[in-house]
């Protein structure tokens, strides 16, 4: 279905540079991984706060604003680096179950946070987070753990 698109990506000069250079792919991968750590660190701090766990209990809206302000940097970096990495071998990655799972977890995680971050103000001032809100935070952590795990499995799944 996407064979022509994947071939077009594969044939791009920039894809060939990423694929054939001895330093471009590893450099992009390092940037991608560190940016992912920054992204997951941001959302994990918010998720832990939803679960009632915080070193310094700030209002949930504080964490929500913090994440909404800074999350665009690692998302942008990961989009650019991930696209370049994918373009180096699009046929191989698109058929890799771990890669497909990573994209699924990532899509659900970003969509989930886009909704939850906007609703966070309603939980300010609560002495204790309601159980349902704590479950939302725990579910989100599991989604991002899925992103990390499937990312690492990409190299080992055929």
Image (cartoon, rainbow, N blue to C red):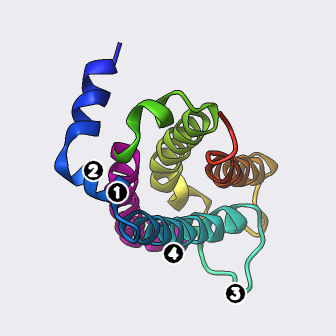
Q: Give the spatial CA distance, label 1 vs label 3.
A: 48 Å
Residue range of the region highlighted in magenta in the rendering: 61-87
Q: Secondary structure at mark 4?
A: helix
Label 2 close to label 3 by CB (< 8 Å): no
Task: List the single residue furthest toward the top.
Answer: 1
Q: Based on the picture, tell me whether residue 73 belongs to the magenta stretch.
A: yes
Disc 3, SS: loop
Spatial separation of the CA atoms under disc 4 and disc 1: 45 Å
Please indicate whether residue 148 sits to the left or right of residue 39 in the image: right
- Residue 83, image x and y in percent? 34, 49
Q: Secondary structure at mark 1?
A: helix
Distance (Cα) linking label 2 and label 3? 48 Å
Label number found at residue 62? 4
**Residue drawn at 33 percent across, 44 percent down:** 87
The mark that comes first in sequence, 4 or 1, is 1
**In the image, which is nearer the foreground, mark 2 or mark 3?**
2
Taking the spot 35% from the left edge, 69% from the top edge, the residue there is: 73
Q: Would you place residue 119 above or below residue 157 in this image?
A: below
Is mark 4 in CB contact (under 8 Å) with mark 1?
Answer: no
The residue labelled by disc 3 is 56
Q: CA distance from mark 1 to mark 2?
A: 6 Å
Residue at 26% across, 20% down:
4
Measure the alpha-carbon separation of dots 4 and 2. Answer: 44 Å
Residue 20's disc is 1
Which residue is situated farthest in the bottom direction here?
56
Quadrant of image for the C terminus: top right
User: On the picture, is 156 further left or further right than 83?
Assistant: right
């Amino acid at each position: 279905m996407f064979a022509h698109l994947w071939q077009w990506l594969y044939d791009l000069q920039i894809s060939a540079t990423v694929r054939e250079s001895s330093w471009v792919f590893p450099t992009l991968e390092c940037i991608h991984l560190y940016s992912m750590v920054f992204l997951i660190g941001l959302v994990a701090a918010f998720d832990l706060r939803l679960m009632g766990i915080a070193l310094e209990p700030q209002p949930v809206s504080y964490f929500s604003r913090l994440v909404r302000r800074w999350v665009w940097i690692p998302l942008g970096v990961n989009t650019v680096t991930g696209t370049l990495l994918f373009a180096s071998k699009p046929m191989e990655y698109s058929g890799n179950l771990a890669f497909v799972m990573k994209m699924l977890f990532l899509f659900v995680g970003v969509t989930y946070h886009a909704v939850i971050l906007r609703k966070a103000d309603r939980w300010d001032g609560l002495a204790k987070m309601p159980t349902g809100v704590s479950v939302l935070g725990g579910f989100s952590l599991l989604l991002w753990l899925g992103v990390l795990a499937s990312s690492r499995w990409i190299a080992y799944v055929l």
